[in-house]
Amino acid sequence: MAATANGAATAANGTDDGPSEFKLKFCTVCASNQNRSMEAHLRLSQANYPVISFGTGSLVRLPGPTITQPNVYQFNKTSYDSMYKELESKDSRLYKNNGILNMLSRNRGVKWGPERWQDWAVGVPRLKHTTDRGSEGSEGGVVDVVFTCEERCWDAVVDDLMNRGSPLNRPVHVINVEIKDNHEEAHIGGQGILDLANSLNAAAREEREAVGASAFDMGSAAGRAAFDERVPDILAAWQERWPNLPCTWTLAWF
């Protein structure tokens, strides 16, 4: 599985010519693009990986005063900052104590607001996201690895990719790391995803050096074949290190 990211000067695909500088491009996905995907987004961006993130739900949902009264927002239209200010004005004590304000404060330091996976135009330059953390290297609108944080999100991503019909004919690894939707588990899950990203990236660098930068960076099945074949073993070794984060993997296509 792999994701590569780069915070340094990059070529058209977001990578540098030097194998030691190459980084996979990653995408993180959860239901509302709030907790698990954003923790992983932050972790990967702090490690200078190119990374973007999304949610697969129909609406953004945050806990409210009761289980039957969630706070509901639309994807792509409401910023994390506006959510923070709204909930702070509603009941600052409640939303501070349950961690929602802290989470939103973190999120607004990463990007503008939650994005929906199904609305993502793959391959279209992300010109409005240049201030997002992890944007450098991900401007082209394609990634090498997608990390989902829940099985239903993995199903949604895989189904959506199949429905799109692979217009770019570009392979992408879709890996689910099952993470419970709470702040503590998201923190642990983010660490696990970063560890997996590092392992994938190390293998990608080796195979890129062997096959040649131009062939690997094209993103074609032929150029990535040797790397793709190594992913199951990388996942198996990672799973031994993180037994409490069950993972599922498939190779899909953009």
Image (spheres, rainbow, N blue to C red):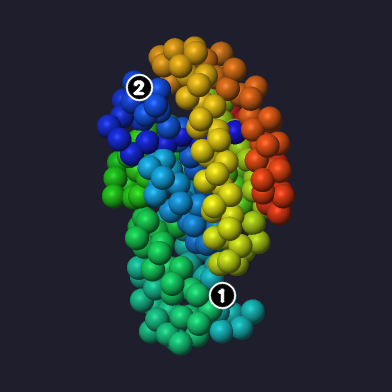
Using the image, tell me which numbered label, if any, was put on residue 86: none
Q: Position of residue 69 (x, y in %)?
A: 59, 80
Left or right: 66 in relation to 136 = right
**Residue at 29%, 45% in the rendered image:** 130
Q: Position of residue 91 (x, y in %)?
A: 45, 86
Q: Is residue 144 visible?
A: no
Choose between 206 and 179: the one closer to the eye: 206
Q: Picture quarter containing residue 165? A: top right
Left or right: 254 in relation to 112 = right
Q: Quadrant of the C terminus?
A: top right
Choose between 180 and 18: the one closer to the eye: 18
Q: Quadrant of the N terminus?
A: top right
Name the kind of residue labelled 2 in the image: Gly
Which circle, 1 or 2, is nearer the viewer?
A: 2
Q: Is residue 60 visible?
A: yes
Name the kind of residue labelled 1 in the image: Pro
Left or right: 253 in relation to 133 = right
For disc 1, the marked residue is 63
Using the image, tell me which numbered label, if any, was put on residue 18: 2
CA gap between label 1 and label 2 equals: 46 Å
**Residue at 42%, 85% in the rendered image:** 92
